[in-house]
Amino acid sequence: MKPSVCPKCGASLESITHGGIEIDRCCNCKGIWFDSLEAEKLKRIKDSESLDIGDPETGHQFDQVDDDVYCPRCGATMFRMIDIDRYSIWYEKCPQCHGVWLDAGEFKKFKRNFSRKRILGRVRKTWRSH
């Protein structure tokens, strides 16, 4: 089943492709649905942060939703999660199909955090070899 409705605001989702990976973005709140491991793959692709066109303040408002959030792919109740490396990123993950919902602005934060960790890893490797 193709995701068609935003789990946060109920608006329709549009399919967007970047680097050969198709994601679904809300036409209203600009949150993004990633099927299993798509966010992990996309964070390594140049300019993929351009997919996250929403206002981070709007995304933050949708973080405050206390109601159950249902997976746009399979309909299961999603779990609310926090990125352990970046406590400002709250996201929803489906326990059945393993997809992830990121509100507007969160994929950019997710990717920035990945870039910082990669640079830090290179610095550590350089220091260890000297």
Image (cartoon, rainbow, N blue to C red):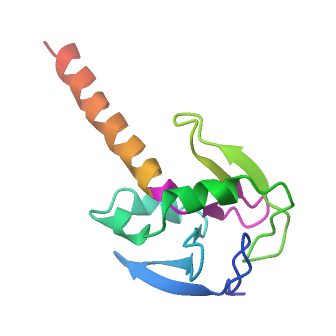
Nearest the eye: 19 or 101:
101
Q: Position of residue 16 (x, y in %)?
A: 45, 83
Seen in the image, is 126 located left or right of residue 68? left
Magenta region: 92-107
Q: Position of residue 99 (x, y in %)?
A: 66, 65
Q: Residue 98's quadrant in the figure?
A: bottom right
Q: Quadrant of the C terminus?
A: top left
Q: Residue 42's quadrant in the figure?
A: bottom left
Residue at the image position 40 percent from the left and 51 percent from the top: 111
Residue at the image position 48 percent from the left and 57 percent from the top: 107
Seen in the image, is 120 located left or right of residue 59? left
Nearest the eye: 81 or 37:
81
Nearest the eye: 29 or 85:
29
* In the rendered image, the vertical position of residue 12 relative to residue 72, given as above or below: below
* In the rendered image, the vertical position of residue 7 relative to residue 65, given as above or below: below
Nearest the eye: 129 or 99:
99
Magenta-span inclusion, residue 103: yes
Q: Position of residue 92 (x, y in %)?
A: 70, 56
